[in-house]
Image (cartoon, rainbow, N blue to C red):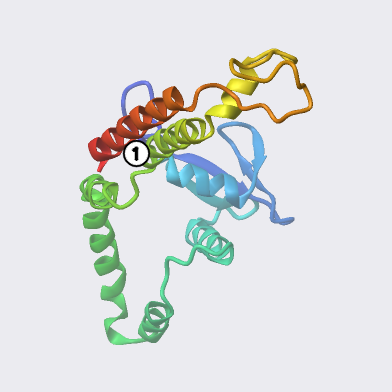
Amino acid sequence: MAMAEHSDGAPSVVTIKKYANRRLYNTATSSYVTLDHLAEMVKKGVDFVVTDAKSGEDITRGVLTQIIVEQEGKGQNLLPIKFLRQIIGFYGDALGGLVPRYLESSMSAFTDNEGNMRNILQDTFKGLLPVQQMEEMGKQNMALFQNAMRMFNPFAQMNRNTPAGTAYPGQNESNPGDTAKGPDIEPLKAQISQMQSQLEKLLKERS
């Protein structure tokens, strides 16, 4: 994550003031912000400290906890119930003082390996969720289906390309009430057979 920096390259810390009406004021942008804004700042690596506007007391821990509670309430639960129970159990315990350092070091190690873990997950699920490949296969299958429909219904294709009232070769012109015999069937059989062979070849190449 990128962190905001001064012109000399040193990390800058944004001061957020919390007023009695619970409104949060970003002194860097001279604007009021919400907990959602602060959550986005955290994700972007922007370091900030929250102080009580009246007393100047550092209340960053409490505000960050509020952000976690709000994010958990939105449905993406990152904190398992068992973990929360264990944390509560350490309050007032003699070993409680070790918990913050342990959690901090564990999360630091997790963050350091975040890039490698993302690559591993992408490589792992790339074969299971080939979205682009599936879309391309869908387009190819649709083209094959349309070609097959035209292949097995050559009369419909001929009717679309033939002007109305045109007599087919072999049609009995002296008796317009008779059913049209249509074109010679043998060339059509040969054409259908050829198209079937081409379709079978295409299917084998994709199998």
Tag 1's secondary structure?
Answer: helix
Query: Could you classify mark 1 by the number of other residues whose Cα lies within 10 Å: few (under 14), some (14-19), or many (20 or more)?
Result: few
Q: Residue at x 59, y 36 (%)?
A: 27
Q: Residue at x 49, y 36 (%)?
A: 152
Residue type highlighted by circle 1: Gln
User: In this rendering, would 61 be left or right of 166?
Assistant: left
User: In this rendering, would 20 be left or right of 97?
Assistant: right
- Which residue is more in the foreground, 24 or 204? 204
User: In this rendering, would 76 be left or right of 55?
Assistant: left
Quadrant of residue 70 within the rendered picture: bottom right
Task: Name the outermost residue toward the right.
Answer: 177
- Which residue is more in the foreground, 190 or 158? 190
**Residue 124, above or below 91:** above
Total marks in image: 1
Where in the figure is residue 140, as x and y percent of width and height? 40, 33
Quadrant for the N terminus, please.
top left
Where in the figure is residue 196, as x and y percent of width and height? 35, 34
**Label 1: which residue?**
133
**Residue 117, above or below 152:** below
- Which residue is more in the foreground, 122 or 203? 203
Quadrant of residue 88 within the rendered picture: bottom left
User: In this rendering, would 2 be left or right of 157?
Assistant: left
Where in the figure is residue 42, as x and y percent of width and height? 45, 46
Where in the figure is residue 183, as x and y percent of width and height? 55, 21
Q: Residue at x 54, y 33 (%)?
A: 153
Quadrant for the C terminus, please.
top left
Q: Residue at x 31, y 26 (%)?
A: 9
